Image (cartoon, helix red, strand yellow):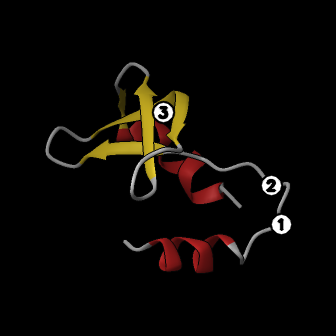
Amino acid sequence: MTCKELIEYLSGFEPDSKVGILEINPETREAHYAKKYQLLTDAGGAVMFFELGDAVPLDDIAEEVEAAP
């Protein structure tokens, strides 16, 4: 993904709306919500770090993900 693609995607949402981060592993059918994040500002490109929470079965959150705005 390029910064241009990310900016274009995010421009479709209200500026003050929250961003949801969900890391999934389709092989184990688990997901991890991001607990914390850090943005690296002195790199040559956009770099984001996410501290992930405990694994959650994808089946347990399927309805939540589908209902997300």
Q: Earlier in the sequence, mark 3 or mark 1?
A: 1
Q: Position of residue 39 (x, y in %)?
A: 53, 40
The residue indicated by pointer 2 is 17
Instruction: Please identify, in this view, whether the residue under mark 3 or under mark 1 is nearer the observer.
Output: 1
Q: Residues within 10 Å of mark 1 (few under 14, many from 20)?
A: few
Q: CA distance from mark 1 to mark 2?
A: 5 Å
Q: Residues within 10 Å of mark 3 (few under 14, many from 20)?
A: some
Q: Amino acid at mark 1?
A: Glu
Numbered tag placed on residue 14 in the rendering: 1
Q: Position of residue 53 (x, y in %)?
A: 43, 21
Quadrant where the C terminus is found in the figure: bottom right
Q: Specify the farthest residue to the left.
A: 27
Confirm or deny contact between disc 3 and disc 1 (CB under 8 A).
Answer: no
- Dot 2 falls on a residue whose secondary structure is loop
- Dot 3 falls on a residue whose secondary structure is strand
The residue indicated by pointer 3 is 33
**Lateral position of residue 16 relative to residue 47, left or right:** right
